[in-house]
Amino acid sequence: MSAEPGFAWLDSNRSESLEGRYSFLAAWPSEEIRVEFGAEAPFSALRGVNRCTGQVNPQGPKPSEVPAWIGYIAYDAFWSDPDRGEPRFDRSGEPVLSFRRYPALLAVDHENGESWILGDDRGAADAFRTRLDALAERKASSPSIGAIEVDAAPQHRRAIERALDYIGMGEVYEVNVARRWSASFEGDALELWQAMRAASRVPLGMFFDGGEHAVLACTMERFIHWDAGSKTLVTRPIKGTIRREATDDGASQRLRADPKEQAEHSMIVDLMRNDLGRVAEIGTVRVDAPLIVEPFTGLYHLVSTVSCTTRPDVSLEAILDATFPPGSVTGAPKIRALEIIEELEQHPRGVYCGALGFIDHAGGLSLAVAIRTATVTNGQVCYWAGGGIVEASDPDREVAETELKARVFLEAVAALQGGSKHE
């Protein structure tokens, strides 16, 4: 199925998180919404996306849980609109928003062990089943990946120190700074993503074949989930990271008690409360579960849940205008943090730190933050990792955190090349 046009896989990967009950596999899209860099108001392309017809199996997931459109919004969508100012990097011709419409797909329920083919109607489901039955067995082969290059640690350390200067001058309270790993790439991008998901089990993974490029995500962070029926909007920002060992030696408790990690996390929770407040009914914004330590492969993260009830007139476009890019991967105040990121980083982020996921059959929106994410395009694979910088940040510790977060990519490459895991 991976070689089929428009293949997409939304993957829960049986994570320890409560997120991700269902996985969805899709191909053969019927239409596409694509916006390239330079477009004014790129989210306006979603104005015509409304409720779709329901799926055919009433015993399966609800319409609000089933993707109708699958895709992503690149971080660089922020800089697409000329009104945002003059960006440092030229992104001309690059897609900043890509969603594809899938009339039918395969749904897997990891809780009950059941699977369904779901479609707009019986005809769409039957056509999908016919195409699925006709597929030949896929022959997997490891891609060819060249030597990995990475933004040098001293260079990244200087960027962190400059971010601290801006914090000291009072221009920003927190700013996320990332570095990039890259290598030449030939072959099947799905094989690399399969190796990444084996290295890191997460609830919100995604593989997306965009034709001339592919997006490979192993993310655990919920950006936004909007239920179009109840008007409930939820975000679950992650900020705060510590290594998770085979035996818990109190690391999770240390993470929650760390003053630096608490400050970093609290600033982003406040930012997300403010973002949600722009589309919320007055008095409905709340923090439901603050500073929860969640376990993932090799890491503990601090997670909070912020929610609200949106106003009746709120649209997908309005929600994205209010909240994008995700605050946890930008900083506070957000606009100034975005400007500093553009100055300090060595490459445009592209999809990284944007959002990926789906618009559901009920007209709602479910997006994850595009972290632990690689892209394959023009014979090159790129992967980024970063961290939030606050006044109490130690540059050496921040550099080490990026390397910890890069392990999912480095271990996947090592596994494909037949070597030992990266240490």
Image (cartoon, rainbow, N blue to C red):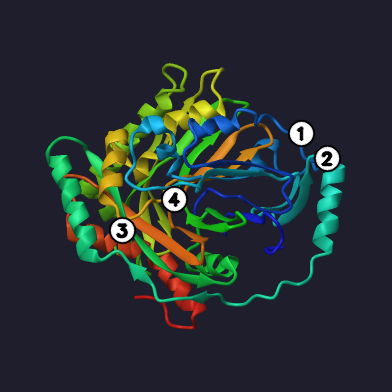
Measured in 3D between alpha carbons, the distance from the residue under mark 2 to the one under mark 3, in whole angstroms, is 47 Å
Q: Earlier in the sequence, mark 2 or mark 3?
A: 2
Indicate which label's residue lies in the foreground, 3 or 1: 1
How far across and how far down the image is residue 101, in percent? 69, 43
Q: Which residue is mark 1?
A: 53
- Distance of mark 2 from mark 4, alpha carbons? 36 Å
Identity, as a three-letter code, of the amino acid under mark 2: Asp
Residue 261 is situated, as x and y percent measured from the top left of the image, at 25, 48
Asked if the residue at tag 1 contacts the one at tag 2, i.e. Cβ–Cβ closer than 8 Å, the answer is yes
Q: Secondary structure at mark 1?
A: loop
Left or right of 54 on screen, residue 25: left
Q: Residue at x 55, y 75 (%)?
A: 143
Please say if 155 is above or below 28: below
Which amino acid is tagged 4? Gly
The residue under label 2 is: 121
Q: Are marks 3 and 1 in contact (CB under 8 Å)?
A: no
Position in image of residue 85 (x %, y %): 34, 34
Residue closest to the eye, 354 or 34 = 34
